[in-house]
């Protein structure tokens, strides 16, 4: 290994643990699980950078993301893509969307082009490089910031509605709900004594979700960030940057708003007002989509459990989520789903200016 200084928030996987963590034998998957500092630095240097040996693992599990120090210049961020999750075409579609947004002066951090390419290859690895942006996550009780975020989301959607993705999926009941339930039931991850309760509540939930979609009407599908939550916004003084379009896909506009709501109904209502006041300065909002908030939250909860299950052979997940696959986790998961079933039967959050926009 080269003489380097590595500051890692998560330890890089050692070869023995990686081999035990994946039984597929797929070369790219095994290489990804065995990713080492030399692999990261060599890949970055292959683009003409001169890394200074400093690495910091950033908070990402689906992909491997690192801040890399550059000799004589600012650091960059490199993302190594998990094999078999997205095709090259779908990754490039994400990159193109990010560049479109940046070209409209939306403060998103797009991939850097080297030559004509944003997706790069080094051995069995696929990776990209972006500029490094620091900052903190936003405070959800900062109403001025929520107003600003609403404006930014509307500007993203004005771009997102100009055309459709060709290689990326839609956020829907099938992909986030049905497939998640089926994967969990078919792979024996739920304790046997809890399987009947899980299967039963899922059937009830899908009825509730479909009811929410019926009340929302034929909501327009557009290109979204789709995973827009406070951790994907960096606040640095008065500057805001949006990061991580890895989950970008088609879906309803409200998907990029609801994850900035926190607390109980009384707390969420003024937060929603502020978000939509900012949003409607640039783009109209269909108030019927408010019926989708709890349905989308339910789908996200289901999808999250299945995501952990699908990645459970990756040792990084076992270290980061040691509570997963315990009886207590599944008890609490089923309880959360029951609470969602009740919430989907309630009236949606009120938006006082809905009739004027």
Image (spheres, rainbow, N blue to C red):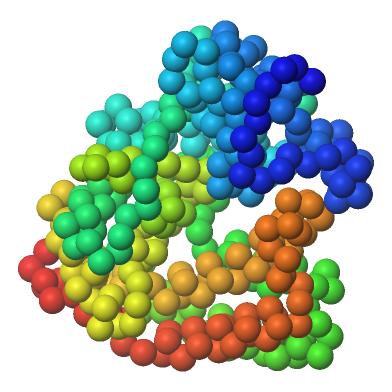
Q: Relative to 132, is 112 above or below?
A: above
- Residue 284 placed where, x, y %? 18, 57
The residue located at (68%, 86%) in the rendering is: 331
- Residue 237 placed where, x, y %? 24, 42
Tag count: 0
Relative placement, left or right, of 32 versus 150 is right
- Residue 86 placed where, x, y %? 64, 41
The residue located at (73%, 39%) in the rendering is: 12
- Residue 21 placed where, x, y %? 86, 51
Q: Is residue 79 visible?
A: no
Relative placement, left or right, of 152 versus 8 is left
Point out the image quarter for the C terminus.
Answer: bottom left
Quadrant location of residue 134?
top left
Point out the image quarter for the N terminus.
Answer: top right
Relative placement, left or right, of 338 versus 103 is right
Q: Relative to 106, is 129 above or below?
A: above
Q: Relative to 8, is 280 above or below?
A: below
The residue located at (83%, 40%) in the rendering is: 14
Q: Is residue 213 visible?
A: yes
Q: Relative to 158, is 231 above or below?
A: below
Relative placement, left or right, of 195 versus 305 is right
């Amino acid at each position: 290994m080269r003489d380097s200084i590595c500051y890692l928030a998560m330890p890089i996987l050692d070869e023995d643990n990686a081999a035990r963590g994946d039984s597929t034998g797929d070369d790219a998957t095994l290489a990804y699980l065995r990713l080492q500092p030399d692999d990261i630095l060599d890949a970055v240097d292959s683009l003409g950078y001169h890394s200074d040996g400093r690495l910091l693992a950033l908070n990402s599990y689906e992909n491997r993301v690192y801040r890399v120090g550059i000799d004589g210049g600012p650091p960059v961020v490199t993302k190594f893509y998990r094999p078999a999750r997205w095709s090259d075409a779908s990754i490039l579609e994400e990159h193109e969307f990010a560049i479109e947004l940046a070209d409209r002066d939306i403060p998103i951090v797009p991939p850097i082009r080297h030559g004509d390419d944003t997706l790069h290859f080094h051995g069995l690895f696929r990776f990209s490089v972006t500029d490094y942006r620091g900052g903190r996550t936003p405070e959800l009780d900062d109403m001025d910031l929520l107003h600003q975020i609403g404006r930014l989301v509307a500007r993203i959607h004005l771009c997102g509605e100009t055309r459709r993705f060709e290689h990326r999926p839609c956020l829907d009941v099938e992909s986030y709900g049905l497939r998640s339930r089926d994967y969990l039931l078919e792979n024996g991850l739920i304790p046997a004594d809890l399987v009947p309760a899980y299967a039963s509540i899922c059937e009830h939930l899908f009825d509730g979700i479909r009811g929410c979609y019926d009340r929302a009407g034929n909501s327009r599908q557009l290109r979204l960030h789709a995973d827009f939550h406070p951790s994907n916004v960096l606040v640095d003084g008065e500057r805001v940057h949006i990061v991580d379009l890895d989950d970008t896909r088609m879906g309803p506009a409200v998907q990029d708003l609801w994850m900035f709501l926190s607390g109980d109904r009384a707390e969420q209502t003024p937060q929603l007002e502020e978000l939509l006041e900012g949003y409607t300065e640039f783009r109209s909002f269909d108030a019927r989509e408010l019926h989708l908030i709890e349905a989308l939250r339910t789908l996200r909860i289901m999808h999250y459990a299945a995501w952990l299950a699908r990645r459970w052979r990756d040792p990084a997940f076992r270290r980061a989520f040691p509570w997963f696959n315990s009886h207590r986790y599944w008890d609490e998961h089923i309880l959360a789903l029951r609470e969602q079933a009740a919430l989907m039967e309630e009236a949606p959050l009120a938006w006082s200016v809905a009739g004027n926009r």
